[in-house]
Amino acid sequence: MSEMSLSDIASKIKKIDFCMMSTKGSQGEISNRPMSNNGDVEYDGDSWFFSYEDTRKVADIERDPGVTLSFTEAPSLLGKPGIFISIEGKATLIRDKSLFEQHWTKDLDRWFPQGIDTPGIVLMKVHADRIAYWDGEDNGTVGV
């Protein structure tokens, strides 16, 4: 069994555009939704996502910043399951347009038609506290 590094995790996540983000709702329930990393994966333990302010996930994060991100790679052509990655961390809401510019990709125009000037836009940074992975017989945790 080989140990994966943060760099190994980054290269895997780079190939997986969407993850599921889990937050804790107002009654303690777990809420899940798909989120795109937009290829913004020079991974150092931080994941970046854009959203609108008036969403349930933003309200959940304001109340409790603990989140989980779940990434799943598609099976190989030979049927071998892809890697599963779970990232537990703390989310921070960012409203600084200079940081918007640093993390913006053209693909985001689909959801935010006025770019970084779209009213109500917010950037979410999830800093990993714990990363676990399962890749066939290989599994483990990665230090952050």
Image: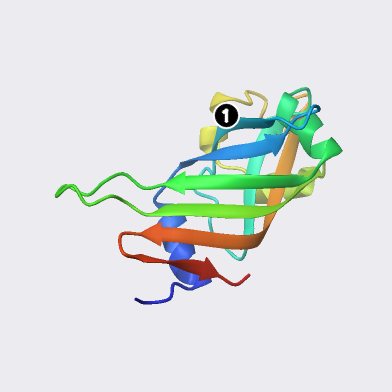
From the top left corner, tell me how far across and down residue 127 is, in percent: 69, 57
Q: Residue furthest bottom?
A: 2
Above or below, 72 against 114 in this view is below
Name the residue type under label 1.
Answer: Asp
User: Is 102 on the left or on the right of 65, as rendered?
Assistant: left
Question: Could you say which quadrant of the image residue 28 lies in?
Answer: top right
The residue shown at (28%, 50%) is: 81
Q: Quadrant of the N terminus?
A: bottom left
> Horizontal placement of 125 versus 41: left or right?
right
- Colouring style: rainbow
**Left or right: residue 137 compared with residue 117:** left
> Can you say whether 8 is above or below 66 in the image?
below
Residue occupying image coordinates x 61% and y 66%: 44
Residue sitting nearer the eye, 105 or 94: 94
Residue 104 in the image: x percent, y percent?
62, 43
Q: Position of residue 29 (x, y in %)?
A: 71, 30
Query: How far across and how far down the image is residue 113, in percent?
Result: 62, 23
**What is the quadrant of the C terminus in the image?**
bottom right
Number of residue marks: 1
- Residue topped by disc 1: 109
**What secondary structure is found at the residue carrying circle 1?**
helix
Q: Describe residue 115's horizontal placement relative to residue 99 as left or right.
A: left
Mark 1: few, some, or many residues within 10 Å (few <14, many ≥20)? few
Instruction: Give the farthest residue toward the left.
Output: 78
Residue at position x 74%, y 25% in the image: 56
